[in-house]
Image (spheres, rainbow, N blue to C red):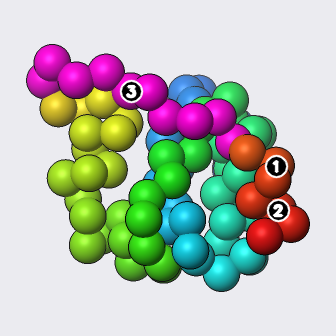
Amino acid sequence: MTFIAVSLPVPAVVACGDDDAPAFRNAAIWLAEVTGGKVHWLPGRHACAIEKSAEVRRSAGYDAGLSSEAAPADPAYRSR
């Protein structure tokens, strides 16, 4: 996974639930850090990116006319 992640030619768009298990929050932060991307924190748990796909698209700036104002990877989530 590390080799694939660090060889991505563009920053990763990472969506993760703010109430997800610590391992998933840590993985989201790591992936954003190694690719130069950002974590888009969504309310919810593990499947929130699937259950709230429209919200993911909006927060990542994929919907026309909307910009992405996602918070950068936040190390504070590591200790949560």
Please indicate, yes or no, whether residue 32 appears anywhere in the rendered image: yes
Q: Which residue is drawn at 65% across and 57% down?
A: 28
Q: Does the magenta stretch include residue 36?
A: no
Report x, y in % for residue 70. Answer: 49, 34
When asked about the image quadrant of residue 9, the answer is top right
Please indicate, yes or no, whether residue 8 appears anywhere in the rendered image: no
Q: Which residue does the numbered mark 2 point to in the structure image?
A: 78
Report x, y in % for residue 63. Answer: 17, 32
Q: Residue at x 22, y 23 (%)?
A: 66
Taking the view exactly as shown, the residue that stands out farthest to the left is: 64
Q: Do the residues labelled 1 and 2 touch (CB within 8 Å)?
A: yes
Mark 2–mark 3 distance (CA, rounded to whole Å): 23 Å
Mark 3–mark 1 distance (CA, rounded to whole Å): 20 Å
Q: Which residue does the numbered mark 1 point to in the structure image?
A: 75
Tag 2 secondary structure: helix
Q: Which residue does the numbered mark 3 point to in the structure image?
A: 68
Tag 3 secondary structure: loop
Callout 3, which amino acid? Answer: Ser
Callout 1, which amino acid? Answer: Pro
Where is 11 relative to 26, above or below?
Answer: above
The region drawn magenta spans 64-73
Q: Which residue occupies the foreground of this view, 14 or 68?
A: 68
Where is 75 relative to 16, above or below?
Answer: above
**Label 1 crowding class (10 Å Cα cut-off): few <14, some 14-19, many 20+?**
few
